[in-house]
Image: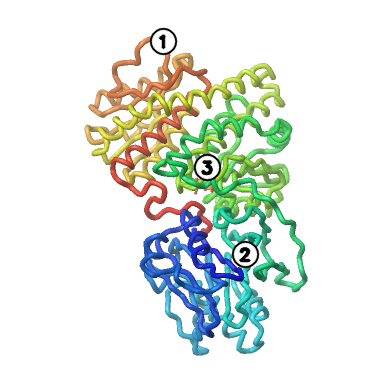
Amino acid sequence: MCGIAGVISLGDIAERLVQCIHNLEYRGYDSCGVAMVNGSPHIHVRKNIGAVAEVSEKERFSSLAGHTGIAHTRWATHGKVTRENAHPHSSCAADFSVTHNGIISNHERLRARLTRDGHKFLSETDTEVIVHLVEDYFMKSMSVEKAFVAAIRELEGTYAVAMISSHEPDRIFCVRKESPLIIGLGTDANYVASDFNAFVDHTKKAVFIEDGEYAVVAHDSHSIKSIATGEAVCREVLELPWDSEMAQKGGFPHYMLKEIYEQPTVVNSALDIDEAKIENLARLTVEKNLVLTGVGTTFYITQFAQYMFSIYGGATPLALSSDEFRHLARMNKDSLVLAVSQSGETYDTLTALRVAKNQRASTAAIVNVMGSSMARTVDSLILQGSGPEICVLSTKAALSQMIILTRVALEAGVLRGTITRKEANARIKDLRAIPDAIERTLNEKSGFIHTIAKAQSHINHWLFLGRERYYPVARESALKMKEVSYVHAEGMPSGFLKHGTIALIDEKMNSVVFMPPKEQKELYDLSMSSVEEIRARGGYILGIMLEEKGKPPGVFSDVITLPKAPSFVAPYLQMVAAQLLSYFTAVTLKRNIDRPRSLAKSVTVA
Ligand code: F6R
């Protein structure tokens, strides 16, 4: 949702700055730009619509001289995708430039006032008011820092802002409120960025800025101060756990495929998370009324967890999509809101946590990004340790969240006495079979899944169907198909099909059925009834199931048979197979796999 970056050094920084926004491109990629101070009273800005590589070449970003600069990669919110609306935005005298991620909710009022006072606006963005406001205050105080703070105090909404000024060419000024911003401390340069992927090639040392604070960054120092009081704030320097190789494609054609292939490792990391942490969280879920929340993929993961808690954990928690949380949730001090988020920055999920806190609920989160807003907001935290997920689509992080939540649900079951410790241990042992089974799926089944994807790539409508815990897997798999291939896909409970949607079944509507293993007899039979109903109406049906004794039933048009594994792990493996199906469909259709149209990795706006 827009990536912002800044670099300050003693030497030229243009190439590094471009690299930073290149690394942040998954946050937004409709347009981009850079601004640099280089001794002239006017800041040099180059920007245009398109991806970083393309615009950078066209606008010759790397040839900009200067040692203090900011840059931006945009996901449009206010104003169309045009060159004028691309960031950075500059003041009338071109002596200030800003990049911004977030939404300034009082921008219309500010724009009207500033226009009356003679400022000329060149874009339709909310961002541009920030820079004119700073310019306005600068004329009164002639201090860049004072002007920056005065302007910020007038802003309403959410923002991460980085600003440079030709009046203070050796400083980057930055601030955050509910949008991420982090300072990187290098040996020959310092950085500001939306997240540490921007500068991980150069340094692993980082400092997090909190809401209500601003920072002034020089090439060899930084200071953080409270916006309200101006008092200096001391923040710990953290060593980041990821290194730059982890964020490279490593020979894979796309990050999505690389991240799918990383899943065996990621599952092991999820299984290696300290038992005490899992137990603590499980205890809280038992002591309190549990509400799970996430959005998009993470909502489906919470739905999966809802089944796990219900089947093994001894109680059925609520699972609420975080975008609707505030409209539905009625929390109190006995509630526990457990949020799930890869980025830890998603606006809707952060808002759900804030609403929960306001209603005196306890909060917890399962998050992949260390130091992210959610990680710092909640009372209890589990860090996934899945490594950087660069593809806009979540694959490995989602699987890891499923594993972690399963562990918590099993532990809750033991605490409640609904399952024995022995049974919980047996299920954990089952989970340990997943990495090997995924390896085998990738090695032995990818070719077949690719063939199916190619053969069915003319189909524009898919239904993804599952019952019980297979139902959220179906929904998540439909979302993957939609977002990466732009093919219409709907996920629903297979039992729901006959209540209306079945009218759509014909030779142009494909179905994927996530089949439970035969030992879940009732579930298996119910799922087969849905398969028969589709078959009777002439629809293509792809079954995804574990290898079991005997041949798969002949009613399926195609079957993806997953390697023999404990029946408990079927849904996790099915999700991986469905990821491959979406991936290969998108490859066949020549889609922009890692950065599908209109999406962004971390949605930090309402
Ligand atoms: C889908 C996807 C999104 C995210 C959602 C939440 O592949 O990635 O649906 O799951 O935007 O993001 P996080 O997990 O960062 O809170």
Question: Which one is closest to the eye, mark 3 or mark 1?
Answer: 1
> For the residues carrying marks 1 and 2, which lies nearer the camera in this image?
2
Q: CA distance from mark 1 to mark 2?
A: 62 Å
Q: How much space separates mark 3 and mark 2, taking CA atoms?
A: 36 Å
Distance CA(mark 3)–CA(mark 1): 34 Å
From the top left corner, tell me how far across and down residue 174 is, in percent: 62, 69
Mark 2, Cα crowd under 10 Å, few <14 / some 14-19 / many 20+, is many
Tell me residue 343's x, y (percent): 56, 49
Location of residue 253 by image quarter: top left
Numbered tag placed on residue 189 in the rendering: 2
Asked if the residue at tag 1 contacts the one at tag 3, i.e. Cβ–Cβ closer than 8 Å, the answer is no
* Amino acid found under the numbered disc labelled 3: Thr
- The image position of residue 118, as x and y in percent, is 49, 89
Residue displayed at 55% across by 57% down: 198
Q: Which residue lies at the image location 39% right of the left edge and 29% below the top edge? A: 494
Q: Quadrant of residue 177?
A: bottom right
Q: How is the image coloured?
A: rainbow
Q: Which residue is mark 1?
A: 549
Query: At 51% across and 83% down in the image, what residue appears?
Result: 42
- Residue receiving disc 3: 298
393 lies above or below 425:
below
188 or 429: nearer the viewer = 188
* Mark sitting earlier along the chain (1/2): 2
Asked if the residue at label 3 sits under 8 Å from ligand 1, the reply is: yes
Q: Is mark 1 within 8 Å of ligand 1?
A: no
Identify the element where label 2 is drawn: strand
Label 1: state its secondary structure: loop
Horizontal arrangement in the rendering, residue 59 relative to residue 357 (left or right): left
